[in-house]
Image (tube, rainbow, N blue to C red):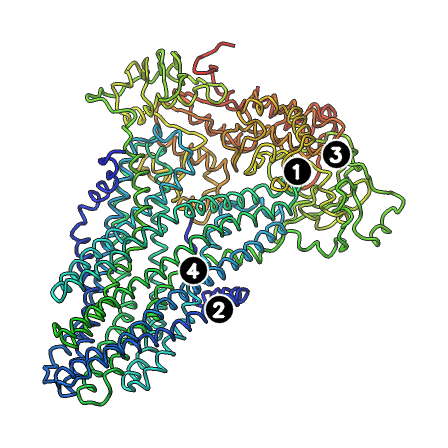
Amino acid sequence: MRPAPAPSKAQTRRLDRWLRSEARNVRQPLRAAVALDGLNGFLLIAQCWLLALTLNATALEHALDHAQAHSLEKHSLEDVWGYIAAIACLFVLRAILNYLAQRLAFEAGARLRTGLRARLFARIEELGPAWSRNQRSGDIATRLVDGVEALDGYIAGYLPQVRRALLIPAAILVFVFPADWVSGLILAITAPLIPLFMILIGGETERLNQRQWRSLARMGAHFFDLIEGLTTLKLFNAARREARLVGRIAEDYRQETMGVLRVAFLSSMVLEFLAAISIAMVAVYVGFRLMYGEIHFQNGIFVLLLAPEFYLPLRSLGNQFHARMDALGAVEPIIELLNAPSPTDRQTDHRGTVPCHAQDANPNAGLREGSDEDRNEENPDDHPEADPDKAPGDIVFDGVDFAYPGGQPLFHHLDLTLPAGCVTALVGPSGAGKSTLTQLLMGFLPPTAGRIRIGGKDLAHIDPEAWRRHIAWVPQSPTLFLGTLAENIALDRDAAAAPIDDRTRSALWQAAERAQALAFIERLPKGFDTRVGERGQGLSGGEIQRIALARAFYKDAPIVVLDEPTASLDPESERLVSAAIARLAEKRTVLVIAHRLSTLASCDRILYLNDGRILEQGSHADLIAHDGAYADLYHRYRQATS
Amino acid sequence: MTRATKHRELRWLIGLTRPYRGWMLAGVLLATLVILANVALLALSGWFIAAMALAGLGGGAINYFTPAAAIRGLAIARTAGRYLERLVTHEATFRLLAGLRQWFFEHLEPLVPARLQDRSGGDLLSRIRADIDSLEGAYLRLFGPVVTAVLTTFLMGLFLLFWSPGIAAVDLAGLLLAGIVVPMIVLRTGLDAGRALVEARATLRQRTAETLRGLAELNLFGNPQHRLDRLRRDNAELIEPQRRQNRLDAGGNALNGLIAQFTWLGMLVLAIDLVRNAHITGPELVMLALFGMASFEAVAMLPPAWRAWGETRQAARRILDLVDAEPAVPDPDVQEPPPTRFDLDFDRITLRYPGRAEPALDAVSLVVPQGGIVALRGASGSGKTSLLNALLRFWPLTDGDIRIGGRSIRTLSGDGVRGLCAVVSQHTHLFNTTIATNLRLARPEATEAELRAVLAAVGLDDAIAAWPQGLDTEVGEAATRLSGGQARRIAIARALLKDAPVVLLDEPTEGLDAASERVVVEALRRLIAGRTALMISHRPQLLSLANQIVHLDQGRIVHP
């Protein structure tokens, strides 16, 4: 992972603001945690006062009693046991408050993370496949999991600590002043210096720290890049050369970094220095005032006991800055994802605004239009198909324009027809827009202008979910999801909701059988219950492809889109997959994207796509006879493979 | 597990730190100084004001200059000590980091790729990464705090012993409880939650990644609502063990606070008794009470250190297991001079991987004449890649011999054999640096004109010249700059630059679309021209370059 560029001050402020506004969603537990901490602070002060009384009675009065041979001994020591018992009670009470405050801070963080993740997931769903296919999935997964985790330190650690650092010193000051105003003054003067110095030095230090962190990350990335490419290095006999380099880079880094750290550590030194020197000053001044009899001993010792506690929350705040930096570093890509422009945004105005609840309830409903006005525009007598087993009519691209936001127009006035029940192949050079065309067809991208008609209906007015119920898709590299093979084939089932029943089982069996997948599935020790992961560990490319085909058979949709499913298979797998595809194509409307031209002869029609338009179309024989661009491509292909 | 192996990781780690021992010791001494200065500052301050108060009340005269100066001196010592300590410990850590990385790299090198073949690439790498990270932090997070805690506790114990064995015993007991017993219990109890957490995080990460990758499939075949519910459940399953851990940690913190406080309260009660019997003075009582309070700073760093201990040890174990394997193919003691002819003769070679019943290659004989081009076909697992690995001396032969130009590879070093071969495979790695640096891997002294020449041979010269940075373009921007076909062609250009007499191709066009495949095959045609070539592929375009095709099936050559 490459380190992100250093955020500027303005950026840091913006990110800080965003995090604080997010924290408002968990105001209640955070406030409760801070309130408990405040109460704890007051109990601490009481505890110090009781201790001061104890020390006064034992160390001072008792000693004086001895010295002056009075007989007050019994009296003062009996008091002491009462104080000590009270102190012990305070210990227990404070421990309970401490526990509860930590738990509340955690719950605040947990609730925030849960809420944020839910929003991010919903956002991904909203952005849709047209967006996600251009994203690096591993990167975003890291953001959503580890990035969101990093916010916890800010919410559960840094924010409550900021409040504590304001609240507790203030409370201590309130009690120190009446006890000894000189000490109160020392604390009051030095305390604001700490955050002041932190801001003054901290700004610079923060940048230095970040720079150092980034160069460490860069060095780490370099090192692991070498590890990853070790085989390649070895093939060039360069491994030993690079080993020396590894040591040298780390050495250079050490020298550079130590130079930076000498400055960076100064800020924490100032903090330490102020805290230490203030305690020393309080002790010395209190000592002299005691000697001159200006204050009472129990006030003096009370102030001395409070002095370290006064600086403690401020010093802890320094430690929390790290958590803050981590959160600030992680938050930018999260905001980016929440604000990512949707590739379908511009179309939302055109689309029917009435949600199709009826279709949601009835998965067997056919295509239905989203809005009444639009229906008037179309032929009102033409009722939509209700039978999912039957293709819902021809698919017609009617003067379709398309451009990616901010990109060159890809299609201009694209016209084409995919006749119902026919197999149509789409060929053309890479970059011609074949994949984009399937995205348009599946409704993941809206045309910029023009229409896609399904049996006469404008796709823009059809509920996307209802439309997708009619389509099965077998991509070049299908995704296997974490779960069993059965769950992967019957993807529409909520695996957690109910166990697979007999009917589903027989449907699964049939789909796998048709996809030529049954034989290898049954050879697996756990059969359909074999668990697979993201990259389908343990399954070969051909087997994964046949699982994807089984998915399509299981869905039994009338329209099938195939994106060159045999592209990267060995010959035996290719034979099996091709046989399954031939079966899937029976009686369905099929669009097949083909990079390899060897299997095209069996297609009903071939569309040759180039420069965003259909250059030629017809059967294989027609196009060869026509001797145009397709024929040229085909001959070159044959030449290369013969 | 025997005692010896049980402490293997620890001994190894300590051995690794030996060269930096001076720095580490200095760091520990400075850290001890900082803690002791802090404890002394508070204790002395307490003593000072009590003594001054007594003096003020007529309890006697006092020399206040020395303690007042000592108090200021301690404050400064603590501050300066802290600064120096941080510098020194970081110095030590960076030195350890440099040493560790070089050590690891050098020890891993002989094992690649033979010993790493079974382990899945991505997983292994991210694990190594995390392991090396935790080893690099071992001093800062583990050794430093532990040694410092032991040292400070010992010195503080000595000091208290001077006043009262009872008080010393109470403080030691408290420190032991807070520094070792409670954190250990918390750690033990939290093991399950920790494991569940790691697992839940991995699951959530994976489920998120697959949701993104398969969003179209989920939209077409699945129910997006189910998916969202599922992800929410995964999130809840991550939060739950964190909650358990938080309960434990918060409880541990609170308990440790209680221990510290009751400890100094106990010390106070004992000290009061001493005052009553006139064994110590009033100011000394105050000093002991404040000493007890401050003494717990000595063990404050221990709970995180114990946590680091488990991690560090696991990391050390995995890294050691990885590099402790014997190098797969040892070089011969006496090496013969390199061959002058470059025909390849595989003579009844058998190769058996440990732990597998069937040999990967079973008495395979094959001759590639000088300048000949032989293609190997066969299903995955038929032994094609094993054949190349045997030739490159990445794996030892179980039986038989391979000769290059009549010279047995057993008499050549691994580097010697690999110097004769240029390899292009599907997995050829491009390093995250400039294109020029990637090319120069093959020949460090190559001139820019030579680089341009090989790029021209693979048809990339124009494309790269058009980029603003030209040859100095970072490959790291590959996602946007280099297509799969271009990356493959840079690998071919690199092989051309090496100008080795033998070319080995391991599915070099795998995963490319038809258009890219065509240009890559064209570049490969130039690479193998005039050289002895052995290629693995089932792609027709590439196979058309071969003048002989050999079929492998389950480790044997078959003649269909």
Q: Which quarter shows the N terminus of chain B?
A: top left
Circle nearer the N terminus (1, 4): 4
**Mark 4 Cα-neighbour bin, 10 Å: few <14, some 14–19, many ≥20:** many
Residue A32: mark in rendering = 2
In the picture of the structure, the residue carrying the numbered disc 1 is: A610
In the picture of the structure, the residue carrying the numbered disc 4 is: A153
Judge whether residue B244 can be spotted in this image. Answer: yes
User: Which one is in front in this view, the residue at disc 3 or the one at disc 4?
Assistant: 4
- In this rendering, is residue B210 above or below B549? below
In the picture of the structure, the residue carrying the numbered disc 3 is: A558
Mark 3 vs mark 4, CA separation in Å: 51 Å
Judge whether residue A629 can be spotted in this image. Answer: no
Q: Residue at x 40, y 60 (%)?
A: A323
Mark 2 vs mark 4, CA separation in Å: 18 Å
Q: Nearer the viewer, residue A86 or B65?
A: A86
- In this rendering, is residue A399 above or below A114? above
Q: Nearer the viewer, residue B251 or A454?
A: B251
